Amino acid sequence: MKILFVSPEAVPFAKTGGLADAAGSLPKALKEIGHDIRVFIPGYKKIIGTQSPVATDVYQEKLPGSEVPFYFYEHEGYFGSREGLYQSKGVDYPDNLERFAAFCKAALLFLKEIKWRPDIIHCNDWQSALTLAYLRTIYKDDPFFRRTAAVYSIHNIGYLGLFPREKMLLTGLGPDQFTSDKLEFWGKIALTKAGIIYADAINTVSATYAKEIQTPEFGHGLDGLMRFRAADLYGIINGIDYSVWNPAVDHHIPRRYSPGTVTLKSKNKIELQKQNNLPQGAEIPVIAMITRLAPQKGFDILAGALDLILREGCQFILLGVGEPKYHDLMLRFMKKYPDQVSAHLKFDGMLAELIYAGADMFLMPSQYEPCGLGQLISFKYGTIPIVRKTGGLADTVHEFNPKTGAGEGFVFEEYTSRALYEAVRRAIDLFRTSAHWTALQKKVMQLDYSWDASAKKYVSLYMKALDKVIR
């Protein structure tokens, strides 16, 4: 199968969130199972290399460690001269619509220029959604694309790609596209609607999130449209790259370990405590969070629960950046509990690996979570997740039952501080019964959330999309 994967970001070239991880890993997994997949992304300023020109304004480089070609759309004004991907100092670029409209147009022009006809064009989030609108409007009668199917992935429906109606003409689409059944959304343009409306198949990054976005609570105003497209909507959990996230081969942690040697994990714990200036002891429960500091991630209920949690005699380590009010919250807790709380208000990849390897529990009290990668990584490191039952967290983490051995972690459903605290308390109680805890660690470390498993599900999705265009 020939697949063009269109994304606004991909590791290792450009990243702001989980989409980049998917765009850097899924194509590699699809290539390894025999598909001809190529990736088209913007040529941002931070992408520095020795790319080779392959077409007008498009340069090529192989994904490191694979044979997947990455094509970079070069536009000095829109991408090459910008420090950020979508924002500058936390403020969206005012010409984001023009930037990504040009990017989407370039993707289709590029295919025609190199005369490479894909079976699938797979677009991701609002920044690439116009590609599918152009495919089904401007190119609808073009024989070159007659047998090309369209797939659209929603990584977070909360990002709608909203712009003023006055910019409609700048998309290159006619006024007939500014209607409620097309791109119009409460008097504005919502670019994500282009992907949802024009795709032959749509997916989100978990089965539960696919159901949640059909409800007013989680649909961000598009729940009606998602219910309308429900027959074409699927959920596929993201994978993780075990060549990177694996304590058996991780060279950035003090002591490597595997399910059979999970007791060595305590060596990493002592080092984590030491680096965080916390009292050292394997018997002290260590709870960690690596996250954006935002309401979506559950900080409102964490604020009301953390005093109770810390009274259980545990330590709490946080890594991440976000809203100033949550920065202030964590700094207050550090001051109040200097022997129990450590907060690193930044991004630090090396520290993240040590946290996964050294913590006992990984906390994700999210209000909503389309997929979540933290719980999947923590599984591999034998760090037990404590999560709220939502989205991908609901699909991957189930309450552990020490009598039967069923379950992978600790789960709460009610979005309250009390429910969060009770889940943490259950986890700490089990931690203090070492035999059950070690058995649970070994179990979760052997779960398979590799991209290979997810890639096969995407192939099935592609076949469903192709079936619509070749009937």
Image (spheres, rainbow, N blue to C red):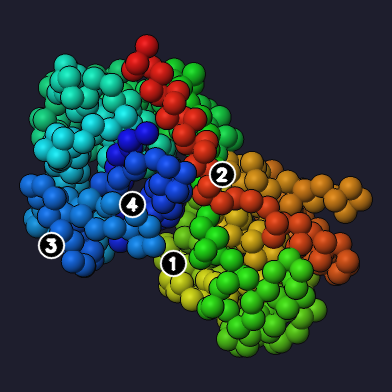
Nearest the eye: 399 or 277: 399
Which quarter of the rendered picture does the C terminus lie within?
top left
Q: Which residue is mark 2?
A: 453
The percent position of residue 414, horizontal first and vertical second, equals 68, 43
Nearer to me, 117 or 468: 117
The CA distance from mark 3 to mark 2 is 38 Å
First in residue order: circle 3 vs circle 1: 3
How far is the residue under mark 3 from the one under mark 1? 25 Å
Residue type at mark 4 is Val
Q: Quadrant of residue 446?
A: bottom right
Identified at 53% across, 47% down, the residue is 452
As helix, strand or loop, the secondary structure at mark 4 comes to loop
Mark nearer the N terminus (3 vs 2): 3
Residue 204 badge: none
| CA distance separating discs 4 and 2 | 18 Å
> In the image shown, does 332 or 343 lie closer to the viewer?
343
Q: What residue lies at 52% left-to-right and 49% top-to-bottom?
A: 451
Dot 4 corresponds to which residue? 68
Mark in front: 3 vs 1 = 3
Looking at this rendering, what residue extends furthest in the front direction? 34
User: Mark 1 is on which residue type?
Assistant: Val
Measure how far apart labels 4 and 1 are at the Cα level: 32 Å
Q: Are marks 2 and 1 in contact (CB under 8 Å)?
A: no
> Is residue 221 found left or right of 74 in the rendered image?
right
Going by the image, does 3 lie left or right of 76?
A: right
Between the residue at mark 2 and the residue at mark 1, the CA separation in whole angstroms equals: 31 Å
Element assignment for label 3: loop
